[in-house]
Image: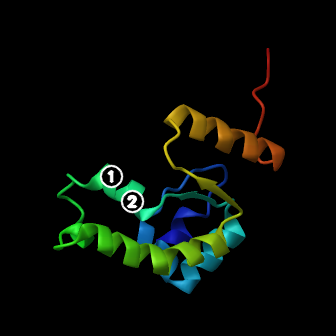
Amino acid sequence: MIDRLTRGPHQVVATGGGVVLRSENRDTLHDRCYVVYLRALPEDIYRRLRHDRTRPLLQVRDPLQKLKELFAVRDPLYRDVAHFTLETGRPNVATLVNTIAMQLEMSGLSEQPQRP
């Protein structure tokens, strides 16, 4: 799936958290894409998702502990594949978007709109 999704130019692919568990996915993402890792601590993720009943991995007795376990495995993999890591913490969406846009621009990866 990642192979197919990453073949086109100029696209944004939002992956699921477990996508980095497969080495082929990590290699494909790193080689074909500019990977921005939106890093969130388990406590922040728990705060955002504590009422979400649609996430099967979190339907356990202690969802925060599960998030910590997932983070311990996935965080190093995402850090390895990422070209840029952005600590999400508590900034608003607009701040995150602006930070990503500036990083893409500084990396020469964003296209400036042409004025008529």
Q: Mark 1 points at which residue?
A: 47
Q: Could you say which quadrant of the image residue 32 lies in? A: bottom right
* Residue drawn at 20 percent across, 52 percent down: 51
Whether residue 108 sits left or right of residue 99 in the image: it is right
Residue 33 on image: x %, y %? 67, 62
Q: In this view, does 30 lie above or below 110?
A: below
Q: Are marks 2 and 1 in contact (CB under 8 Å)?
A: yes
Q: Could you say which quadrant of the image residue 101 lies in? A: top right
**Is disc 2 placed on a helix, strand or loop?**
helix
Badge 1, how many Cα within 10 Å: few under 14, some, many 20+?
A: few
In this rendered view, identify the residue nearer to me: 50 or 1.
50
* Residue drawn at 58 percent across, 71 percent down: 78
Q: Could you say which quadrant of the image residue 43 lies in? A: bottom left
Whether residue 87 sits left or right of residue 105 in the image: it is left
Whether residue 59 sits left or right of residue 103 in the image: it is left
User: Quadrant location of the C terminus?
Assistant: top right
Residue 52 on image: x %, y %? 21, 54
In this rendered view, identify the residue nearer to me: 87 or 114.
87
Q: Is residue 32 above or below residue 116?
A: below
Residue 112 on image: x %, y %? 78, 32
Given the current orientation, which residue lies at the most extreme bottom position?
23
Q: Which amino acid does label 1 sit on?
A: Arg
Whether residue 17 sits left or right of residue 29 in the image: it is left
Badge 2, how many Cα within 10 Å: few under 14, some, many 20+?
A: some
Which dot marks residue 78? none
* Residue drawn at 67 percent across, 71 percent down: 30
Given the current orientation, which residue lies at the most extreme top position?
116
Residue 75 on image: x %, y %? 53, 73
Q: What residue type is labelled 2?
A: Glu
**Is disc 1 placed on a helix, strand or loop?**
helix
Which dot marks residue 43? 2
Q: In this view, does 86 lie above or below 23?
A: above
